[in-house]
Image: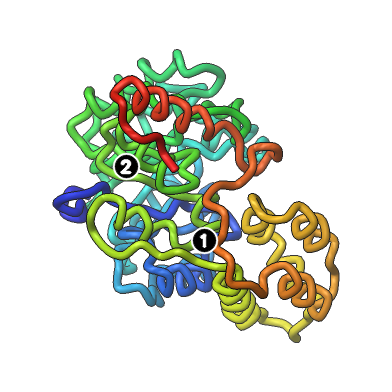
Amino acid sequence: MRDFLPPNRPLLALAPMQDVTDLPFMRVMERFGGPDVYVTEYFRVYENSRLKAYILRSIDENPTGKPVFAQMIGQDIPSLLRSVRELEEHPVAGIDLNLGCPAPVVCRKDAGGGLLRKPAKVDRILGELRQAIAGRFTVKTRVGYESPEEFEGLLEVFQRHRIDALAIHGRTVRERYQSPVHPDCIRRAVETLTCPVIANGNIVDVDTGRAVEERTGAAGLMLGRGAIRNPWLFDQLRSAFGDGTNPRPTGKDLLSYIEQLWEETAREQTKAYRGDRQVQKMKRYLAYITQGLDPGFDHEILRASEEGEFFRICRRYLSHDHPLPGLPQETSRRFCGFSDLLSDISSRATSLNLPSPS
């Protein structure tokens, strides 16, 4: 992973999000600047599992020219080792292990974030995978299952293995996405580990990205929901760190983004095209895109069922040249707790007589 780190700013990565960060989404993200590194949706690994062909396309047909890491999720060691051998037959930049997914159906199987309840099992898995993986081996984790106090013990496990990077979502599994992050845990990992640490969670605009970088000292930032909502955010962050232009999108620009998402994802319908099915697919993105905009947009679009209705609503709310708001609201379950980062950095700016974040 070190060979991908930019010289004068944090690495920017797109967080793996199931049923979102697929090949069509990668195509669209790259048109808006995109991250430095992509990570696939996770491959579910279990006895007799097979690599999902649709996710493999994100690797084999990678249109971005940028590194793509393949992520696995599972807890059966022989199956994980088998999947490593199969994945290394494809042009992966590295293999990533998911220790952070908080979905109850995953955790009940002691996979994803559920594995954090069993540090000894994590230790065995990391040891076996490190020995088997010929190339880069990275891990994505949370700071604990029940409490961030668990993180110190998890760090001891990570220290024992030569992983090439650790991405940390700064919440516990129990907190899911409904709390502020714990940047001090990420800072502790930066101070403890010899590999690069990537900070994830609550990066929703430039100021939150800079606050996370300042609070943690992380070598990289990983964006998930914030990037769905604002595909320009990668380039905006590059500009903030002195490396590129600063896009200032308008409503019409956002409408174009939605239209491109529609076009790329509709192309993937393998059965006879159905507009109503495509509307439901698009709602996975619009649930985040609408945040911070007129509440009526969110209310109407999530109740749309037909293609014509979907685009009439989008055009009614977005056919304008006004700049888009920088932040989503924190009054929904989709974005929560990021104001803690902004208030913290504002307090320090005040104490140093500097301008507060915009």
Which secondary structure, mark 2? helix
Image disc number at residue 21: 1
**Is 192 on the left-hand or right-hand side of 312?**
left
- Of tags 1 and 2, which is closer to the observer? 1
Which x, y percent locates residue 185?
Answer: 37, 23
Between the residue at mark 1 and the residue at mark 2, the CA separation in whole angstroms equals 24 Å
Pick the residue in front: 21 or 200. Answer: 200
Q: Is residue 85 above or below residue 118?
A: below
Which x, y percent locates residue 197?
Answer: 28, 37
Res 76 visible: no
**Is 133 on the left-hand or right-hand side of 122?**
left
Image-quadrant location for residue 267: bottom right
Badge 2 density bin: few <14, some 14–19, many ≥20, Cα 10 Å: many
**Is 213 on the left-hand or right-hand side of 44?**
left
The residue sitting at 45% across, 13% down in the picture is: 149
The residue sitting at 28% across, 36% down in the picture is: 218
Q: Is residue 84 above or below residue 269?
A: above
Image-quadrant location for residue 126: top left
Q: Is residue 11 above or below residue 120?
A: below
The residue sitting at 58% across, 66% down in the picture is: 322
Find out whether the residues at labels 1 and 2 contact each other: C-beta distance under 8 Å. Answer: no
Pick the residue in front: 135 or 78. Answer: 135
The residue labelled by disc 2 is 129
Q: Amino acid at mark 1?
A: Thr
Q: Earlier in the sequence, mark 1 or mark 2?
A: 1
Res 303 visible: yes
Pick the residue in front: 213 or 39. Answer: 213
Which secondary structure, mark 1? loop
Which x, y percent locates residue 151?
Answer: 40, 20
Residue furthest out toward the top:
149
